[in-house]
Image: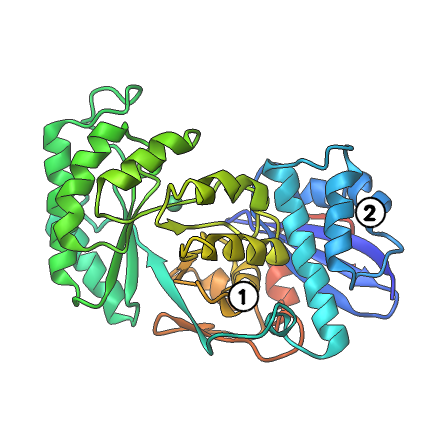
Amino acid sequence: MKITSVAAALLEPWPWVLIKVRTDEGLVGIGEAYHGAGVHNIAVDPRLTERALIGQDPRNVDKLFRDMKNSMSASGFYQGAVMSAISGIEMALWDITGQALGTPIWQLLGGTFRDQIRVYNDCNEGDNADDPLSWAQKAKQVEARGFDALKFDIDPRPTQRDRYNRTIRNTDIAFFVDVVTAIREALDPDTDLAIDAHWRYAPADILKVAYAFEKLDLLWLEDPIPPENIAALREVKAATRTPICTGENLYTRHGFRELVEQQAADIISPDLAKAGGLAEGKRIADLADTYYIPLAPHNICGPIGTMASCHVCAATPNFHVLEFHHLDNELWNSLTVERDLIQKGRIDLPRGPGLGVQLDEDVARAATKEDVGGFYA
Ligand code: MG
């Protein structure tokens, strides 16, 4: 079997990037790359396609992953949009391989530890962002739809006087504590609550928040400080009982090595649609497992990238919970032939060959902003 073409589609309004790899035997693989400027164009760049993929056997997934990394420079070191494009292509190669063998991808990754993938819903604040009870009401509404894990953001408030020094005013600390306490008290004790700080704060300031959160038994506090300094994060993690999660902007196992070896996070959150795809995601998970660190993949993909991530979540003993960002987004729900993939905060493990779900081509075409390389040819 040989790869004959690679194509990509950029969707709207959400800029999901779908990848399609075709073969001379008629098998077609689908993947999704983390969105970003030009990722769909990079995916069909001849330096990736003609140099590394066209004419090659798509089932040599790991070799082709290496070849893609090496095809643009001898260093093979890529992050950002290039690694996102490679990640989406890698998923499509797994989809082809699974279809060719008549088996789901998770089987090829070592088999499954679970029949369902637990997902957490990323929530926005309530209708009135200044009222903690409004946030709590939103949390109750989402919990009532069957989710037993939720996440809210504590971004800097408009009242924050100086966003550049990363400090937090005492009144804003008190507000964050009021909001998260209100949410926590509204939820069932067994519903998990995560809080995302989006890298915005100085260690000493976010620690005041983390200390106050300790009695709330959060699932985690995500990205408490800026992402560039692992030693600083290790200090934060060591200083509080509130679990710390990070990793959505790290690429490949090499990007996670120091974070994991320094044990600077309690939970890691690679985004598999940018960190290198499925086999690399499994490697990152295994690396984390050597330090008993659970895996909670970041995910803002459409259903293709989400379902692809599920295969790694299934095959990973230290999987914790998978992110979901698109509650009430009808396009998310209609982009696959199989609808309502998330039921009561769980995704049933796909049992069909390859990815196990099919892109609804008509729905995708109607939402496509740009088709490069003949995605619908
Ligand atoms: Mg985040």
Q: On the rendered image, what quadrant is the C terminus found in? A: bottom right
Query: Image quarter for residue 207?
Result: top left
> What crowding class fits label 1: few (fewer than 14 Cα within 10 Å), some (14-19), or many (20 or more)?
many
Please give the label number shown on residue 52. Answer: 2
Please tell me whether residue 59 is drawn above or below residue 182 in the rendered image: below
Specify the quadrant that holds the N terminus.
Answer: bottom right
Picture residue at 64% right of the left edge, 52% below the top: 88
Q: Residue at x 19, y 55 (%)?
A: 217
- Left or right of 293: which side holds 301? right
Q: Is residue 287 visible?
A: yes
Badge 2 crowding class, 10 Å Cα cut-off, few under 14, some 14 to 19, many 20 or more, is: many
Amino acid type indicated by mark 1: Met
Secondary structure found at label 2: helix
Q: Which of the two discs, 2 and 1, labels the residue nearer the N terminus?
A: 2
Q: Secondary structure at mark 1?
A: helix
Instruction: Depth check: give the residue in front, 365 or 353.
Output: 353
**Rendered image: mark on residue 78:** none
Residue 376 seen in this snapshot: no
Alpha-carbon distance for marks 2 and 1? 26 Å
Mark 2 or 1: the one toward you: 2
Residue labelled with disc 1 = 307
Vertical side of 321 occupied by 87: above or below: above
Asked whether the residues under the numbered discs 2 and 1 touch, taking CB atoms below 8 Å apart as contact, a structural biologist would say: no
Residue 305 is situated, as x and y percent measured from the top left of the image, at 56, 58
* Amino acid identity at mark 2: Ala
Please tell me in which quarter of the rendered image ligand 1 is found: top left
| Residue 368 x/y as whole percent | 62, 52
- Judged left or right of residue 46, residue 252 is left
